[in-house]
Image: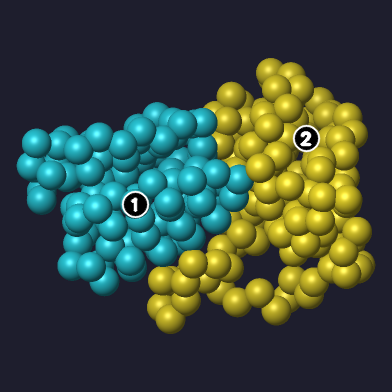
Amino acid sequence: MRLDVPSDLGMVGDAVELVASHVPPGTLSPRRISFNLRTALAEALGNAIRYGTGEDPERVVQVHVELARDFVRITVVDDGHGFDTSRVPDPTLPHHVDREYGRGLFVIRHLVDDVAFNEKGNGICLTLRAG
Amino acid sequence: MRFTLKKDKSGVVIVGVEGQLIVGNRQELKQKVLDALEEGSRKFIIDFSKTGYIDSSGLGVLVSLSKKIREQGGELRLAGLNADLQTLFELTKLDTLFAITRTAEEALAAF
């Protein structure tokens, strides 16, 4: 499944629902589809639209969904410059906890089984294994 | 996705979040609460009992609202988190920033 999502934060919810509704029952539990997949994908799309494409309505974010018997893999790629994921601070440190931003990647890492980035840093691959 | 606001007879504003609180709708929630704050309300409960998921932008707007309400001498309480949302708040340590109760009724009684 491939989607081109307009660079509009208002489209994130609809795109997430579209992807979630196409994940067949069986591979992931309904609970993981309802929460882990939806939240992680919303994070990835929000980051790509806000930081990758700068909410430019002329640009799109590409989503590729691979459905297998024992995993679901979602790749989100924007056409931005990418970012260095190693420089994202831990949002749970005492002096960061009351910040309004900076939790997205932390949340994603806790919701999916594997997170990978492309070399440029403008693409993220989320893998949720069966269960 | 829908936000509902109702005011209890004691003046506590109870905000219901139906669906999700994410990057695409957080500003709508923020504006509704700020409008009520501007109109004089000081005690707020956000009820997540009908909420499926919250992303980090949604969490961020809760942090922002909590600060703004406290600046005006008020308080924001959260209620109705399901097990996954409760875990999300614990992972991010936001459970240390907010007063969280099992139900909106419990939050109301605690004011």
Quadrant where the image shows the N terminus of chain A: top right
* Residue A38 figure quarter: top right
Expressed as whole percent of the image width and height from the top left, the position of residue A65 reads: 84, 35
Depth check, mark 1 against mark 2: the one in front is 1
Q: Relative to B28, is A118 on the left or the right? A: right
What amino acid type should be assigned to the residue bearing mark 2? Val
**Separation of residues labelled 1 and 2 (CA atoms):** 42 Å
* Residue A24 figure quarter: top right
Q: For the point 88% across and 51% down, which residue is it? A: A59
**Is residue B99 at all visible to an observer of this figure?**
no
Near mark 2 (Cα within 10 A), the count class, few <14, some 14-19 or many ≥20, is: some
Q: For the point 17% across and 45% down, which residue is it? A: B12
Q: For the point 48% across and 46% down, which residue is it? A: B28
Q: Colour of chain B?
A: cyan
Quadrant where the image shows the C terminus of chain A: top right
Chain to which the residue tagged by mark 1 belongs: B
- The chain painted yellow is A
Residue of label 2: A72
